[in-house]
Image: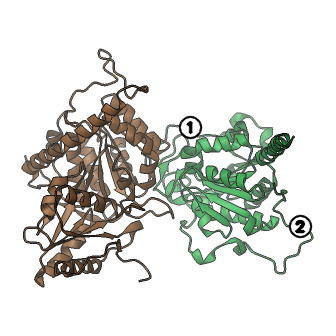
Chain colours: A green, B brown
Amino acid sequence: MAEREPNVAEEESTVAEPRTIDHYLHTDRFPHIWCPGCGLGTVTAAFLRAALELGLEKERTVVVGGIGCSSRAVGYLDFGTVHSIHGRALAFATGIKMAHPEFTVIVLTGDGDGAAIGGNHLIHACRRNLDITTILFNNNVYGMTGGQASPQTGMGGIATTAPFGFDEPSFDLCRLAEAAGATYVARGTSYGVRQLQRLIRDGITHPGFSFIEAVTQCPTEYGKRNPPKGPVQMLENLKEKAIPRKKAEGMTPEELEGRIVTGLLHRDESVPELTASYARMLERVRGSADE
Amino acid sequence: MATTEKLMAVTGNQAVAMAMKQIDPDVVAAYPITPQTDVVQSYSQYVADGEVQTEFVTVESEHSAMSACIGSAAAGARTMTATSSAGFALMWEVVYVAASMRLPIVMTTVNRALSGPINIHCDHSDSMGGRDSGWIQIYNEDAQEAYDATVMSFPIAEHPDVSLPLMNMYDGFIISGAIGPLRPLSDAAVKDFIGEKPAVLNLLDSEHPVTFGPFDGLHGWYFEHKIAQNRAMEAALPVIQETYDRFAEVTGRQYQHLMCYDMEDADVAIVVIGSAAGTARTVMAKLKAEGLKVGLVKIRTFRPFPTAEIARVLSGVKAVAVLDRADSFGAMGGPLYLEILAALYHEGVHTKTVNCIYGLGGRDLYPQNIEDVFRMLADAAGGADLPQSRVYLNMKGE
């Protein structure tokens, strides 16, 4: 098996001209489909700036999307990309990573794609601790199909399928990912873009399954039915509700009600990563066969 | 009291949602997918406004949607859902289960291409893939047909000789999203037409416990069960026509398995499914003015397939083009073409045929494309040969 090399530029390497995120974009595909005020482009740009920071090679990076507004991002990215099927981006990514452990594999998904139809794939990808970085764009709604309630719409949230308010609680996706076995779990928002970029960057370099929830705004399908209305107000709301993990640690559950705890929430490097342990098993089995 | 309401302008999806509202089924379980979404979205509004008594279940995938429908129908409830494309594909496993359990679920399948590359526009590859699933399949040209077919669905599906699930199709975006004329029935006329759900064995009847779909073992009755499904499908053909006829008595709109246009004196004919029939008719008007004897057959009932009837209708023409909005890769032609060739051979009809593939992934079908096909057929009627392989209409790079 080929020796694994981290897909990260050497520190000495110099780039002739400073690159911008355009380096990783198919700008010829613009204008993109996202609505004015949408946060998905902000989250995508945070990922691309993290990729720039790490100097990710396009040829050794694969980005997989599912279906929905967030997954549509892969269509604009100049990496190896797969626009897969609804809820199964992680299944495609698992195959890619197992076949090419040397690739950096990123999954872009949404709350409908990743937490509803793809929920089972999400928990099992966490459990396997395969070195994939999943960025889940959480905008609380099925945006592309017209504002139906998703698992993340939240109690009382108005959606086209819940005109008098959704009466089901949401997942705490980060706690779900941690409980399922993800070894890097973080949460950021489309307001705190620098923090989000750092969390994504560290997730990519973490050797195991990284789950980053990016809480973002959908003014078109969520905001028009739920306060605060308007993209600026929604961003201000994210700013006000976000609270760093360290600060949150000293607070009571009542004080944390409705707040968005951000930052690195969980990291465990003691758990074996799947492609590495699989390679070791191959070595062991082949070694014993030769005896 | 009038049986029909005023003429209105609605999208195909709104027309079907209205029909569903008038039917007021016991249960609707669904998941959003373009271009079906606003059928169920509109319906959720009716539920929220208390205009229907339906138990409305939002689920986390289409596999769950059809599973919920099966549970509900097995409990004896009138059950409806809607889907498209990948949603239908994800239902696949349970689509077969619904048919083999003989549950009269009614589903709207708004036709959309299957991936990949990802495409949200119309073709028939989704429902054509389900043609052997054991569901009755009715294809509709426009919003009025889709509405009427929805109203006629339960009397067909629940008929004691049939007891099969039924799916209604219409073209995604072209019909689902475009506004067209609709003359709906009154609520009372719909209620009267569909009647009460016939009493059947169900899971909630504790006096007569039943089990649905248990493991049949290696030496069980699976084979005979499949034969029974096919017999039900054969029985459905006259039941569908009787229902069409009864509907005509109420509305004056007479449907047939095959809708024929100017076939009495046609030299050549096109066979087509769905909204392309409208495009074909406008072209025919022009060509008939030139003196060309052109005809059109629109297939409405695709499962069960009206084999003898299509052969009879086409027996008098010299050349036929079958237009498929889906392909069957590696086969002799698209699914409709294969069906019609088999019917012609079976009934001993020898006429020149050609298969035209069009509209995949929403590619436009222009009147000129249809005109070209009619002129090719006219040449063939005059002695020229027709292409043996597929003819692709409006392909890029030609």
Q: For the view shown, which residue lies furthest in the front direction?
A: A291
Query: What kind of element bears circle 1?
Result: loop
> Which callout, 1 or 2, points at the residue further toward the start of the chain?
2
Q: Estimate the x, y position of residue A135 in percent, counting from the top left.
A: 68, 54
Query: Amino acid under label 2?
Result: Glu
Q: Is residue B25 above or below residue B138?
A: above
Q: Estimate the x, y position of residue A146 in percent, counting from the top left.
A: 45, 56
Q: Is residue B392 above or below residue A147?
A: below
**Chain to which mark 1 belongs:** A
Q: Which residue is mark 2?
A: A10
Pick the residue in front: A232 or A273. A273
Q: CA distance from mark 1 to mark 2?
A: 46 Å
Residue at 15% x, 55% y is B309
> Is disc 2 surrounded by few (<14), some (14 to 19) or many (20+) residues within 10 Å?
few
Tell me if I can see residue A189 in this picture.
no
Pick the residue in front: B217 or A84. B217
Query: Amino acid under label 1?
Result: Pro
Residue at 53% x, 68% y is A33
Q: Is residue B180 above or below residue A261?
A: below
**Chain to which mark 2 belongs:** A
Q: Which residue is mark 1?
A: A169
Residue at 92% x, 70% y is A12
Residue at 17% x, 76% y is B284
Report whether A15 appears left or right of B275.
Answer: right
Tell me if I can see residue B206 in this picture.
yes
Pick the residue in front: B13 or B94. B94
Q: Estimate the x, y position of residue B393 in percent, counting from the top left.
A: 34, 75
